[in-house]
Image (cartoon, grey):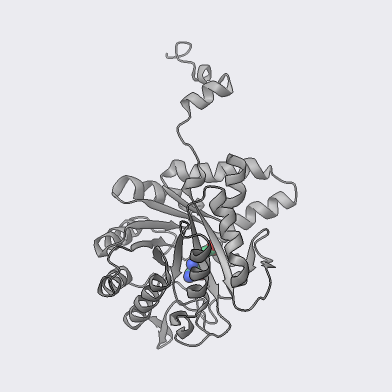
Amino acid sequence: MTYPISRPRRLRKSEALRRLVRETHLQPSNFVYPLFVSEIVDQTTPIASMPGINNFPVKDIAAEADRAFKLGIPAVILFGTPSKKDATGSESLKTDGIIQKTIGEIKAHNPELLVITDVCLCEYTDHGHCGIIKDHDVDNDSTLEILARQAVSHVRAGADIVAPSDMMDGRVGAIRAALDDSGFAETAIMAYSAKYCSAFYGPFRDAVDSAPKFGDRQTYQMDPANAIEALKEIELDIAEGADIVMVKPALSYLDIISAARSEFAAPVAAYNVSGEYSMVKVAAQNNLVDEKRLTLEILTSIKRAGADIIITYHALEAAEWLK
Ligand code: PBG
């Protein structure tokens, strides 16, 4: 019998003791703050499905990026809504496209803040899918070519890291080759490696109007029931040149984050997605929970599971609370 020799409560007696033995330390340097920029709005506009999060016109973006930087958050990730959409997402390649202009704006004001770009077609296609449609499905290989051109275009505009989120096979390799050919061998890729086909993306698709107009994303995003397949996806992405791998969403996938952390020698990012964020906000608005405690508990659990990097809409508030 270990009791009463072993009494774990001895180390919980005071805040000083609890701090001394605390295993996980959440810091603003762990966070990436997502920013939505839009050609459709001409002033900062709240996103109804994500309380506290806004769609910004390019002219307002530098100020918001600056708020993140001043709080010690090292990076932002950009999502854009163009004014025109078409079958191949051609707006995403323009040198004066919404993302390209936004990168320039942020870098002009704050060159030290890291700018990560989401590389995908769903925000730019009129059908809302993440690639080119052939025979009623997303065609893998013709999509790769556009993704690679989009990634190069973002890096030319000044992006520090590109993050492909489309889940096509071979996209990390295609993007790596295109970046190297264009003289960007030093630019890192953060791959959305284990991205699940999840209902937790609902509020995001509202925000950027990217819900698929027909069908769903089950032929390219992962089945939530699979864990071994996630390790395979991560392994493939690392072999193709991914520098950082990602698990998305975060909360229902803490087991995947934990496995990724223990199996691979690459930084692991976790995406605390829109549905996870909005559930907290709506619960707090209804006084069902203590918002600050709940948010910090959630973010700590993602880090404890093994995430080195947490992409979260809570970033600004959490950084403020951690001061
Ligand atoms: C696709 C993309 C999505 C998210 C990030 N990149 C949505 C999707 O696959 O439909 C989701 C982010 C979130 O829900 O917060 N470009």
From this view, report whether residue 133 is shown above or below residue 186. below
What residue occupies the far right of the structure in this picture?
A: 286
Q: Quadrant of residue 179?
A: bottom left
Quadrant housing the N terminus: top left
From this view, report whether residue 66 is shown above or below residue 145. above
Residue 199 falls left or right of residue 51: left
- For the point 73% across and 52% down, which residue is it? 285
Residue 43 falls left or right of residue 79: right
From this view, report whether residue 189 is shown above or below residue 293. below
Question: Foreground: 183 or 194?
Answer: 183
Counting from the top left corner in percent of width and height, residue 95 is at 45, 80
Q: Quadrant of residue 275?
A: bottom right
Counting from the top left corner in percent of width and height, residue 114 is at 45, 58
Say how many tags the image has.
Answer: 0
- For the point 59% across and 46% down, which residue is it? 318
From this view, report whether residue 255 is shown above or below residue 7. below
- For the point 45% across and 32% down, which residue is it? 23
Question: Foreground: 10 or 37?
Answer: 37
Q: Quadrant of residue 279?
A: bottom right
Q: Is residue 198 visible?
A: no
Quadrant housing the C terminus: top right
Residue 219 falls left or right of residue 85: left
Q: Is residue 311 visible?
A: yes
Counting from the top left corner in percent of width and height, residue 171 is at 32, 71
Counting from the top left corner in percent of width and height, residue 199 is at 54, 64
